[in-house]
Amino acid sequence: MSFFVEKATAFAAVVLITAVPALRAQQIPLPDYEIILMDAEAYHADYDFGAASQAYSEALRKCTDSTRRAEIEKKLSQSRNGRSMSGYCQRPKVVARKNFSRRDFFLYYPLADRSWRSGPNRLDPRPSAESPVVWFPNGSKEAYWSMADTAGVRNIYYARDLGNHWSAPYRMPFSSSEDEIFPMVSDGKLYFASKGLFGVGGYDIYVCERRPDGRWGEPRNMGFPYSSPYDDFLFINSPDGRYSIFASNRNCSADSVSVYVLEYEPVPVSSAVRGVEDLQKLCRLDPPRDLKKVDNKSAMSASKAADPNTELYARKAAEVRRLREEISRLNRELSTLRAFYNNASPAEKNEMAEKIVKKEARLPGLQSQLVAANKDLQKTEMDFLLHGVLIDRSRVEAESDNEVVGVETSYTFTRRSPGSSDF
């Protein structure tokens, strides 16, 4: 049984265990269609949309409750959408994947520092747990954000800077009857997540192309593996044009999300999957085992620097800090292993000793790399001084204050600072 089936079946079992005693106490039997629905939801969560469609159809035939029928019809439609979308899948190359807390995962995107604004604020006076922030960099001339309407449904709004004031908020015409969140304009396209448009359940990711008249075209579901039966959102292409990044809760606990980094594909090719297992593997988006070949340096800064000398210096400084962070992390791991070693069983001691030896063997090499990186940074400073080049140290220092995550791989996630909600 796959992870997805186990997860869905466990959830269904909890529902059944908690519901059945109450129903028996009232001498009310569980309807047949509810049992069939549990199977359907497990199939759907496991990307087996054919089996899910059949089960939903059977449940629909047995259900007479009009409210419940509407819910089943929606889920049946999503499973049929999944079958259709399985014929047009992309196969991007995975660079990295890292789990973060739902509270601040967006701060680890390679975007401008202090541009995520927490709510409440003037654009989103009623933030939600699913959409707690607004992307609004300093100097923005236009804004796209998610905001609840009078019915409580979150739609995407747009406003532009008219010089001495902002235009009135304009609700995007593709708004559905359910929530839309995390709108982002990236590489000239508008990306956002929606629960109410053509999709396979949860939040799916959509893209709009800009028409010749400047208006946005109809949203298109980006399909597998960007969308899934789970929640997928906040898609961007990195400012340097090298990576595509998005978040999803498909492979993690309820209080966290995975951030996926993929190689940017200017002209993606779509093809059909070869079956359920192929689709499951595609949507897991497992990073390659050998990450040494991955080049992540262009993702270390928020965007292309106006001054190439400052950018060069910032990259060298970031490499020094990355090595320091990795050495520090390795020493912390060694301290933990040594602390537990004395009280471990003989078998555990053998395993820990092997880990300790391997980690200790890495330290000399990392320390040598750090010495070389420091010398390189110092040489760069001297070269700049000799040629009268001034470095924007405030920017470099601001970036060096950001937390670095993922130093165990060749891709480094750098934590940005949140901006003020008063803007």
Image (spheres, grey):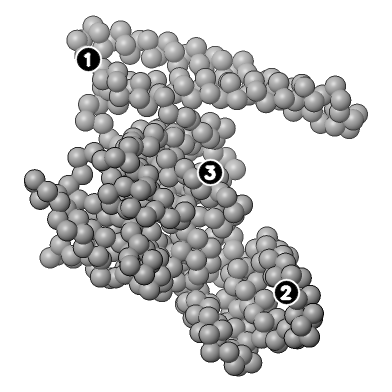
Please tell me which of labels 1 and 2 falls first in the chain.
Answer: 2
State the residue lying farthest toward the right. 346
- Name the spot of residue 2 as percent of width and height, x first: 69, 63
- Name the spot of residue 116 as percent of width and height, x first: 35, 42
Element at badge 3?
strand
- Name the spot of residue 362 as percent of width and height, x first: 64, 22
Q: CB of mark 1 within 8 Å of CB of mark 3?
A: no
Looking at the rendered structure, the kind of residue marked 3 is: Phe
Element at badge 1?
loop
- Residue 12 lies in what quarter of the image? bottom right
Task: Name the residue tied to disc 1.
Answer: 390
Instruction: Check residue 100 in the rendering and tell me which mark sits there, or answer none.
Output: 3
Viewer-side residue, 419 vs 227: 419
- Horizontal arrangement in the rendering, residue 93 relative to residue 208 (left or right): right
Measure the alpha-carbon separation of dots 1 and 3. Answer: 37 Å
Please tell me which of labels 3 and 2 falls first in the chain.
Answer: 2
The crowd level at tag 2 (other Cα within 10 Å; few <14, some 14-19, many 20+) is few
Residue name at image x 33 percent, y 22 percent: 396
